[in-house]
Image (cartoon, rainbow, N blue to C red):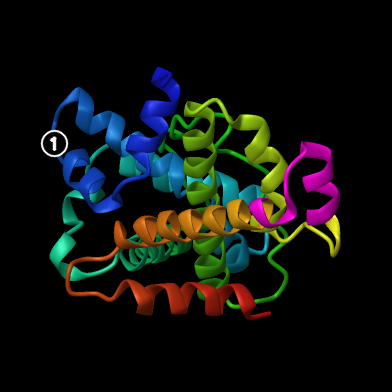
Amino acid sequence: MSEKNSESIAFHTTRWSRVCLAKSDSEDGRRALADLCAAYYEPVVVFLRCELRDADAARELSHSFFAEMLSGGSILSADHERGRFRSYLLGSVKHFLANHRAHQRRQKRGGGVEHASLDDEAVQAVPDVGLCPPDVAFDRQWATTLLGRALDSLQCEFEAKGKALIFERLKPWLTGDAEHGEQRALAESLGMNLNTLKGDILRLKQRFQELVKAEVAGTVNEGDSVRDELAVLFDALRRK
């Protein structure tokens, strides 16, 4: 397995363990904190866009929020025993926004907050969030992020086995992009028995479900139910 793939799979373990590591004043701690900020940039920026109704302002304030996170101050209040990492991060950004608005009321403009250093890949275009409530938009993007990370982990597993092409051919059955009748056409193109292909797709879906549950389990404490958290997130995906 390549070093890159190994790191990717290791990162898709548990967010709370990364939070605990991020609290330490060490190089590993700072790297863990940067990983967390990059991983959950999009839910925060989507929430802020709903609140601010301005994509540029949402990006700017998101950078300021993560700059504060990267400074190591606010992460110290994160406590695994107090609940879900999703709730912690949403509460943190709400508190940050309230302070920002209070500061704006006191002064016409802010300043002096250095922008966070995030990888270019993490700073993507802000999705069109429409007019849904900010909390719903946050949860929806959180769910999308978790599903995407589980899908990336699954791809890494296939690549590590030298089966990257097979994964790309089967992925449409995970993402909902496959159309009726495509299984037979794919089986013929691969020279496979149709029932064998169906079995491969079923196992792929089962492994994906395991990875999604692992991602979710890493964001809740031991007293929270993974099933309950999954229900909340999939409900957010369905809501308009």
Mark 1 lies on a secondary structure that is loop
Q: Amino acid at mark 1?
A: Ser
Q: Nearer the viewer, residue 33 or 218?
A: 218
Above or below: residue 32 compared with residue 109: above
- Figure label count: 1
- Report if residue 45 lies within the magenta region: no
Residue 182 appears in view: yes
Relative image position of residue 196 (x, y in whole percent):
65, 52
Image location (x, y in percent) of residue 42: 54, 51
Q: Residue at x 29, y 56 (%)?
A: 218
Q: Is residue 150 left or right of residue 36?
A: right
Check disc 1 and report the residue beneath it.
Answer: 24
Question: Residue 202: x percent and y percent?
Answer: 58, 59
State whether residue 186 is above or below residue 156.
below
Vertical position of residue 116 compared to residue 192: above or below? above
Judged by its main secondary structure, the magenta piece is helix
Q: Residues within 10 Å of mark 1 (few under 14, many from 20)?
A: some
Magenta region: which residues?
A: 183-196
Q: Is residue 141 left or right of residue 111?
A: right
The image quadrant of residue 191 is top right
